Amino acid sequence: MAAETKERIVRAAEILFAKEGYAGTSLRQITESAGVNIAAVNYHFGSKENLLIEILDRVVGPINAERLQLLDEAQAEDTPDITAVLTAFLLPDLHVLDELRSRDPSLPRFVARMYSEDSELMTRVMGRQFAETQARFYTAFGSALPELSSEEMAWRLNCIVGIVVYLFAGVQAPGMPPMLGPDVDANLARLLSVTVTLMTAPQPLEVSTPI
Amino acid sequence: MAAETKERIVRAAEILFAKEGYAGTSLRQITESAGVNIAAVNYHFGSKENLLIEILDRVVGPINAERLQLLDEAQAEDTPDITAVLTAFLLPDLHVLDELRSRDPSLPRFVARMYSEDSELMTRVMGRQFAETQARFYTAFGSALPELSSEEMAWRLNCIVGIVVYLFAGVQAPGMPPMLGPDVDANLARLLSVTVTLMTAPQPLEVSTPI
DNA sequence: GTCTATAACGGGATAGAC
DNA sequence: GTCTATCCCGTTATAGAC
């Protein structure tokens, strides 16, 4: 029963963390929602913080793994163009988002929350997860967009990360349809149409500083 | 001393909320950091939640006020083009971001946090603040981009909001320069170059659904 | 391996003196 | 308007029975 109890805790905790935040969720809520004893979290994970780390790794890990795999495939034959590199970057996000959403509609927000939480813990986990991926993609984007300064390229890539994080946040203005539909391919196409344009926009002129 | 004590509490609390989140900040932290008595929050604001609402209003209110004013000015003579409307939309963000940053480097993150917190409270405050602004800008963007479907227009505008929220979050990859420099005009120019391109990208084709 | 019970502590809020 | 003292509750974590 050990494995099942652990799983029940993880499934309950990730939803609660997504809805209420890490600090806003108590072990009582988690264990009650999971239908396990209140002592089970500390028995199986050692502490509330270790539970969060496990959940973070489970969510972020697959994104990076698929990103690197898609980039490998795109680079197998020749230098991929910007659409191919962006697809390798974005598609894993949409897959994970879809998987999270299918488990619980509020679950994707968990990822967005990680980005606006500044704690030492988040920086550590996210940094460890994203280090390799970042270097690989910076190089790939640089090859696909040789005319762009690397600084501007990184800046625009950050804009795209902002858009993706916002998708995960699932912010929905009243009366507006959700930003993502049920079809992953359609979502990707729409996202590519703006992000490809964004990355290939002409390099802006330096603004002259007044005297 | 009443007014000063209230101010001291607000200034201390907004920084702590930005750094640790609402749930992650205790009244003891706030009052200690403000150098006031622990009972002062409940005396001046009634509750911790009312304190948050006051801080939220103070941050979000000026953004909307300036947005509407700039839009009024842009619409005074004739129908403004997309750059003018986007400037009215984005410049107030950069102003507030700059003002927050000058008070404390971690303060802008407070705004980003509001977007990823899903609580009933956030939805209520943000909804009340943004309702009028949203309607006015949807119309203005529609006039500036008549060839775009209103649904696609709203979708892209959401992408821009995502970028702006990410700017407020101040996420900074290791070894990368911050996304915003000290000069507001330069920041605006850079932001406009990608957002104008994003909004004026050709309308994507509908993805045909396979049988 | 899982439970109950409880320890040890910190949380928000308030009563009442000054 | 500001303080001290305290209430009452929920928090994480653990000890020990089963």
Image (tube, coloured by chain):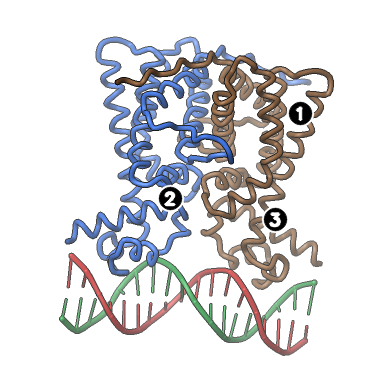
Chain colours: A brown, B blue, C green, D red
Q: Which residue is mark 2?
A: B18
Query: Which subunit holds the residue at mark 1?
Result: A
Q: Which residue is mark 3?
A: A54
In the drawing, does residue D18 fall left or right of residue A120? Answer: right
Image location of residue A87, percent across then percent down: 70, 25
The 10 Å Cα crowd at callout 3, few under 14, some 14 to 19, many 20 or more, is few
Q: Are marks 3 and 1 on the same chain?
A: yes
- As helix, strand or loop, the secondary structure at mark 1 comes to helix
**CA separation, marks 3 and 1?**
26 Å
Q: Is residue A74 above or below residue A50?
A: above
Hey, what amino acid is under mark 3? Glu
Image location of residue A156, percent across then percent down: 55, 26
Give the number of the disc on residue A71: 1
Hey, which quadrant is residue B73 in on the image? top left
Residue at 69% x, 30% y: name it. Answer: A137
Q: Nearer the viewer, residue B165 or B129?
A: B165
